[in-house]
Amino acid sequence: MQGVKQLTQGPIHKQLFNLALPIMATSFIQMAYSLTDMAWVGRISSEAAAAVGSVGILTWMANSISLLSKVGSEVSVGQSIGSKNDEDARNFASHNVTIALIISVCLGIILFVFAHPIIGIYKLEEHIAADAVFYLRVISTALPFLFLSIVFTGLYNAAGRSKVPFYIMGMGLILNMLLDPLFIFVFNLGVHGAAYATWIAQGCVFSLFVYQLRYRDALLGGFPFLTRLKKKYSQRIFKIGLPVAVFNTLFAFVNMFLGRTASEYGGHIGLMSLTTGGQIEAITWNTSQGFSTALSAFVAQNYAAKESKRVIKAWHTTLWMTFVFGTFCSLLFIFAGSEVFSIFVPEPEAYHAGGIFLQISGYSEVFMMLEITTQGIFYGLGRTIPPAIVSIVCNYSRIPLAILFSRMGMGVEGIWWAISATSIAKGIILTIWFIIIKKKALVLR
């Protein structure tokens, strides 16, 4: 098939690494959009950082919903490529793009119209809430750009060509890094300037993807972006992608609740510690997500091609890669959390509080990477429900645990311990689940 790289033959280590590196870099770039805003806004004040951070949780929710089409693309298109079914690959691509557009427009309208009551959940001071509402409304109008760029990324990953999204996302990040200080400080627009810079950067990324697919590339031999939805393809996409989107979206709702609880116990410093600390912690999350996505694409093709031994060997290889990096990040957060946090918010009170968040999170980093890596093999096999069950149960247990620990006298730090403990549990439980399935030969051909 034109524009596709086959992953069913050749050295596993090299293929995984070559596929994972651009995906990781792309994930870091997506994370860097938020971190760039946070780094510049944090130099205005911790209150401005709290405003942007509160919207960051909602942006996370939007990204979670977009996973329906992203994972749907990576698995459905990847398996079609592995089974050498060109027509299905193109139809799945068109359906994923169409579904992503419909969902993004609907979600954007909801967030724009109900921005005030949504931000009101955090009980922020009036001037902080006003900045957050404006930021949310600007970002909500860019959701179609975001969703379609994410689904295009998924299509390239499925085809084994993860370098293309990396280059395009990289150009968008450079633009955002240039526009942020210009709009925030030179034009003196503050938080509003960060919103404008992000909107323009995301619009440019979308435009570059369209240009690449229409004029420079022939991915999957060419396919229409929009199509009339058919039950055969739509049902398969929702079966694969919906569990992933649901548990990640529910995860975002949990974080909204934890954000409100952190605001109650620690004021805007507590909320800022959670949101900014979560963005910094995404360094490990995005690294493991990059390897997980590469593993998913690799497994999808090899599973469809009945190459079971390659599937298991790829999982073992990926686990070792993520373990080494996870250990490094754990040590960094535990012993230098405040120093890392101060890079983004230089106020002493803020980075000391944020450093405690990173220190407590550090104990769970290896287990978080273990969970996300194991998710990749489940996704590649088309079994997205087990990770969803583990994630939903453990993430929602954070709410009663956070309330219990905080009321026991631990204050806002009780919330951080609830997050860390459940991350450890998710990594252990999901790995045991896969080992049991593997032993019973339920996922192998």
Image (cartoon, helix red, strand yellow):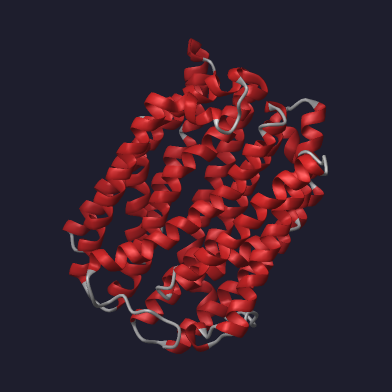
Q: How many marks?
A: 0
Whether residue 425 is visible here, answered yes or no, is no
Q: Is residue 423 above or below residue 206?
A: above
Q: Quadrant of residue 104?
A: bottom right
Q: Is residue 397 left or right of residue 318?
A: right
Q: Position of residue 320 (x, y in %)?
A: 24, 50
The one of 166 and 54 positioned closer to us in this rendering = 166
For the C terminus, which image quadrant?
bottom left
> Residue at the spot x=38%, y=68% of the render?
297
Q: Position of residue 132 (x, y in %)?
A: 75, 38
For the N terminus, which image quadrant?
bottom left
| Residue sitting at the far top | 409
Q: Position of residue 244 (x, y in %)?
A: 48, 56
Q: Quadrant of residue 272?
A: top right
> Residue at the spot x=62%, y=38% of the render?
39
Q: Is residue 62 above or below residue 16?
A: above
> Residue at the spot x=28%, y=44% of the render?
323
Whether residue 7 is visible here, answered yes or no, is yes
| Residue sitting at the far front | 186
Q: Is residue 237 above or below residue 140?
A: below
Q: Is residue 198 above or below residue 368?
A: below
Q: Position of residue 298 (x, y in %)?
A: 33, 68
> Residue at the spot x=61%, y=42% of the render?
57
The one of 323 and 437 positioned closer to us in this rendering = 323
